[in-house]
């Protein structure tokens, strides 16, 4: 919570650094890189409305990139590392890494502190994420430039994102488009290729596939045929159960095969498709290795409940918490406590089967709300998900419906309508879904 009466953002950041990391700073010690980047963008004629992104913590928190320099001893560095590890018991995953100056802009959105080796001496310099000094160092200006290049600050003369393409930010600060095109049951061959090309033409850039779907080749080919650069797309795939059961080598081979089939160089997110009992922790460790190698940018989990997540995150050797969790979410399968649990821990929630039950809502509250807002039932369900800060995965083979689904961002839902949508899932619905998930996990 920002305290405007006590040095605002800088004061809040300084207090957090002391409380959580044991680092004493004055507000005046901190350079607000976000403010600097925004000022430069505004001076160039840009209105950077999307440049300060909501933090993974939710509520009224926003990511602000702050910078300071200070000399510390190696003993202080070791003490800091111990303190931060202790915070994990309270659900805080604040990390400490020694990196080169040229790499420190890659700080996670959730990190409070990052260190790099000062090449000419055996000391360290400190970079804090969160929160102005009169004099800007060359390092601070370098960071602004790198943050801008990575899309974390607005480029001078351009907006971070279109209002028609809403985004969230993951732990590492990278953006994830909230409108995703799902490839489940999209056929292989020319028919599937044509569907994906139409989705790209409609504006989709986030594509959700899996090795088991059998259409990774078509997705990769469609991206090449589109003529658009790889960096414009957000590509996700998933490790299937058989690879997990066959061991860590098989998992690596599965991911490498997906990358070769897609021909995309790297995956923005690689999911564990299902938490295969006795295997998903080892699978995750392989994904950590692939992330370190640059083949996977973020690790996702899919169909994980709270119990599986806690087993994973507490396991020895797990050093990188998952960035996203994909589960079934819609107004007709809404488990708010479950969603809040993961969002509180910094995970972006991805709604699979967001329109899975839409065929049964020709009558009833969703249909009535849609008619009142001159929208389709699917648009109401997608808009509901966006307002819940969810990534919404939807699929259709119809170009007209692709455009309709993307237009859901313009649908306006009143507070009372949202409450009505929130109330559509019964306890019996949740129980039936959880029993089905349990059967699937036990049957793997």
Image (spheres, rainbow, N blue to C red):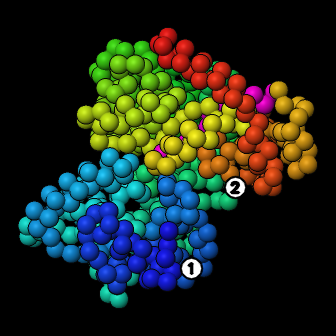
| Residue highlighted by disc 1 | 42
User: From where the camera sits, is residue 355 visible?
Assistant: no
Q: To which quarter of the image does residue 78 belong?
A: bottom left
Along the line of sight, which residue is nearer the eye, 102 or 301?
A: 301
Residue segment shown in magenta: 347-359
| Residue 344 point in image, percent of width and height | 49, 49
Q: Which mark is residue 164?
A: 2
User: From where the camera sits, is residue 272 visible?
Assistant: yes
Contact flag, marks 1 and 2 (Cβ < 8 Å) = no
Q: Is residue 349 magenta?
A: yes
Along the line of sight, which residue is nearer the eye, 426 or 36?
A: 426
Query: Which residue is depicted at the point 31% across and 52% down?
Result: 87
Label 1, label 2: how far apart the Cα atoms are: 21 Å
| Residue 119 point in image, percent of width and height | 13, 67
Q: How many marks?
A: 2
Above or below, 294 against 41 in this view is above
Q: To which quarter of the image does residue 148 belong?
A: bottom left
Q: Residues within 10 Å of mark 1 (few under 14, many from 20)?
A: some
Above or below, 334 against 56 in this view is above
Residue sitting farthest toward the top: 443
| Residue 236 point in image, percent of width and height | 50, 36
Q: Secondary structure at mark 1?
A: helix
Q: Secondary structure at mark 2?
A: loop
In the picture provided, is 437 more to the left or to the right than 28?
Answer: right
Query: Which residue is depicted at the point 32% across and 48% down?
Result: 88
In the picture provided, is 363 more to the left or to the right than 89?
Answer: right
| Residue 158 point in image, percent of width and height | 58, 68
């Amino acid at each position: 919570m920002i305290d405007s009466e006590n040095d605002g953002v800088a004061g809040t950041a300084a207090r957090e650094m002391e409380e959580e990391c044991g680092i004493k700073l004055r507000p005046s010690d901190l350079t607000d890189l976000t403010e600097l980047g925004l000022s430069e963008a505004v001076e160039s004629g840009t209105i950077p409305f999307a440049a300060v992104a909501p933090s993974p913590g939710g509520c009224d928190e926003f990511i602000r990139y702050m910078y300071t320099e200070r000399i510390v001893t190696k003993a202080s560095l070791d003490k800091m590392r111990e303190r931060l590890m202790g915070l994990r018991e309270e659900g805080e995953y604040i990390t400490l890494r020694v990196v080169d100056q040229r790499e420190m802009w890659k700080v996670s959105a959730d990190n409070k502190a990052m260190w790099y080796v000062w090449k000419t001496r055996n000391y360290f310099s400190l970079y804090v994420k969160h929160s102005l000094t009169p004099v800007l160092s060359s390092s601070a200006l370098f960071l602004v430039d790198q943050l801008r290049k990575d899309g974390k600050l607005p480029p001078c003369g351009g907006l971070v994102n279109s209002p028609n393409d809403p985004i969230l930010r993951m732990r590492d600060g990278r953006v994830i488009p909230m409108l995703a095109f799902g490839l489940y049951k999209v056929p292989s061959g020319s028919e599937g290729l044509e569907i994906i090309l139409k989705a790209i033409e409609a504006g989709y850039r986030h594509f959700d596939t899996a090795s088991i779907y059998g259409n990774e080749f078509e997705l990769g080919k469609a991206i090449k045929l589109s003529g658009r650069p790889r960096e414009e797309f957000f590509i996700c795939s998933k490790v299937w159960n058989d690879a997990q059961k066959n061991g860590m080598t098989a998992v690596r081979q599965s991911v490498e095969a997906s990358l070769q089939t897609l021909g995309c160089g790297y995956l923005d997110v690689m999911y564990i498709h299902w938490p295969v009992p006795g295997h998903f922790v080892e699978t995750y460790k392989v994904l950590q290795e692939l992330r370190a190698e640059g083949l996977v940018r973020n690790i996702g989990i899919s169909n994980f409940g709270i119990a599986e997540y806690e087993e994973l995150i507490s396991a020895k050797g797990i050093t990188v918490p998952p960035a996203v969790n994909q589960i079934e979410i819609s107004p007709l399968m809404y488990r708010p406590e479950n969603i809040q649990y993961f969002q509180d821990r910094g995970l972006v929630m991805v709604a699979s089967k967001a329109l899975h039950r839409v065929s049964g809502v020709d009558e009833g509250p969703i249909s009535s709300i849609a008619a009142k807002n001159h929208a389709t039932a699917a648009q109401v369900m997608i808009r509901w998900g966006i307002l819940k800060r969810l990534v919404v995965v939807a699929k259709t083979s119809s170009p007209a419906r692709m455009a309709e689904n993307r237009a859901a961002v313009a649908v306006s839902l009143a507070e009372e309508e949202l409450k009505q949508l929130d109330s559509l899932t019964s306890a019996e619905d949740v129980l039936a879904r959880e029993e089905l998930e349990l059967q699937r996990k036990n049957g793997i």
